[in-house]
Image (cartoon, helix red, strand yellow):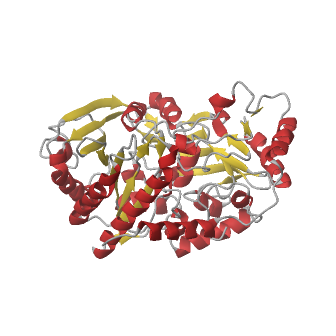
Amino acid sequence: MQINTSVILLALAFVVAKRLPKAVAHTQPILCCDKLNALFHGQGKVVFPNSPTYNTQNTYWSTSSYETPTCIFTPASAQDVSKAVALFKQKSCIFAIRSGGHMPNLGWSSTSNGVLVSLSGLTSLHYNAHRNLVQIGTGNRWNNVYTYLDPYNVTALGARDSSVGVGGSILGGAISFLSNKHGWATDNVVDFEIVLADGRIVHANQGQNADLLRALRGGSSNFGIVTSITAKTYSLSTITSGVMLYPSSSTNLYLQALYNYAVNGQDSNPNFHIISIFSKSPGQGVGVIGVPFWAGEPVSLSNAPPVMRPFTDGSVPWNAQFMSNLTGMAGITTALIAPLGNATRSQWHVCSIIANLQLFKDIVNIWKTTIAPYENTIPGISNSIAFQPIGHEFIDAAQTNGGNSFGITAPLVIVSSNPYWINAADDETMYALLAKLFAKIKVAAIRANKYVPFEYLNYGGINQDPIASYGRQSVQRLANSKRKYDPDNVFGKLVQGGFKVPGF
C-alpha cells in the first residue's frame, strides 16, 4: 500500500493544532525571571544567560531538545518549588520542567520564552531497610539511585539506561529490567510528593489522594511538579547481563526466539528480561543487538536458564558478546550508556502490536525499505527498530499496586524507533520519515489483526498523542483528576510542552 507523506503530515498538523492550549495572556519572561530572582535573592537558584554557570546547567541528552530559557531556576526543596509555582500561576509565567532532560522532543523539558525549572537540586536519597522502601528526589538520575542501593543488595525499579532522570521517566511509566516480575517502575511508587498548581505540597498514596496516585502513574506532568517519590525495593545481589551482537543473517532466527519468548517464556520465568534492537547505519548491514538480563545465580552462555538460552547458546548465531556476572544494577545500566550513546538530533516514535512471528518479520522489512532512501541523504543518520514484549505478570502488577493510567489488560509488544542524525535542517524530514514508517507498520498490523492502540508515553514522538491511546475509561479518569487537582489548567497552559490529557 502506497502511503502519501503529505497526507500524513497534514493529518499530524491537524492533531497538533487540536492539542494547542487556549490562548492566555502571559507576563513577559524576563519580568517573571526578575520576580523569581527577587523571591530567591542571593541564594544562587536563578541564573541568567550572562551567568558563567548558565551553559553548564542548560544541558540535554539530545540537541533536538536544546533551547535557551530566559532563566534557569534550580530549587533545593519542595518548598522552593511551591513558591515558584505560586508565582508562575499568579503572573501567568511560561515555564518548562526538566528532571534528566532525556526526552528529545523540542519544548518537553526546555523553553526559549520562559523559565526552565531544573530539578537537579532535588537529589535526596534515603533507604528504609525495615519497610523495604527508598525515598528518591526527582532530580536524581537512575545511576545515583542504583549506586546508592547496590551496597544494600537491593534495587528499585527504574530506567535501564542509568543516565535517564527519575522524574520524567517515572511519570511516563519506565520499563525496568525487573518489570516482568514487578510491572512498570511507576507501579512500584507508593508515594508521590507533588507541588500542585496552587502551590500546595501534597502526597499521593493509597491513604490520601489515591486518585492522584493512579493519575501520576502514566499521566506525565499534567498535575503538578513531583519533587520526590517513595518506591518499593527488592533484593538483588548477582545478575548476568551484557550485550550480544548478532549478524544480519541471524535476523529470522532471532525473531523466532523473540516470538517464542513473548508468547511462552516471558511469564514462565520473569527473572529474565531482554531488550531487542535492530540497528542500521549507512554503509552497514542490519545488526541485531540483544541485551539479556538474568536476575539470579550467575550463569554462563551455555548453561543459561531455558528462557534465556535461545539468545545465548548459539542456536541464534552471534558474532560478539560482552556478557558478565555482575553485582547490583549500577553496572549494567551504566554500561548501556556507551552503546546506546548520547544523541545529536533524535526523535522517538512508538506503537504496539500483539506478538506474531510473521508480523515481526514484516515490520523489520518495512523498516529496512522505508529508511533505505534516506541513508545517503541525511548526514549522520543511525536508525533502529526495537521490540519490547509486555506479558501477563508485567500487566498484573499494576492491579496489585493500585492501578495505573495505561489501560492495558492483555499482553502486547511495544515497537519503537529512535533514530539519530546531525543537522537541525533535517528535523522535519526525519519526523516525516518516522510518521511514514509507523503508518506502514500500523497498516501491516491491522491487516494481521494484531494492532493494539497503545502508545508508550516515554517513547512517544513529538506528533503523537500517547495519553489519548490509554482508552476512554482511563482518559476520563485522568480528566477527572485534572479538574480536581489543576482546575485552572496551569500545567496545560503555562507548561506548553509535554503530552497533555485530551481536552486540556
Residue 392 to residue 272: above or below: below
Q: Whole-percent x and y of residue 254?
A: 20, 51
* 143 left or right, relative to 300: right
Q: Nearer the viewer, residue 223 or 134?
A: 223
Residue at 44 percent across and 66 percent down: it is 454
Hey, which residue is sitting farthest front in the picture? Answer: 377
Hey, which residue is sitting farthest left in the picture? Answer: 315
Residue at 14 percent across and 43 percent down: it is 317
Q: Nearer the viewer, residue 50 or 98?
A: 50
Residue 119 to residue 108: above or below: above
Which of the image's four quarters has the N terminus? bottom left
Residue at 57 percent across and 45 percent down: it is 65
Q: Whole-percent x and y of residue 11?
A: 51, 71
* 187 left or right, relative to 74: left
Q: Is residue 403 visible?
A: no
Which of the image's four quarters has the C terminus? bottom right
Q: Is residue 407 visible?
A: yes
How many marks can you see?
0
Residue 379 to residue 184: above or below: above
Q: Whole-percent x and y of residue 368?
A: 27, 54
Residue 87 to residue 73: above or below: below
Q: Whole-percent x and y of residue 115?
A: 74, 44
- The answer to which quarter of the image holds residue 244 is top left
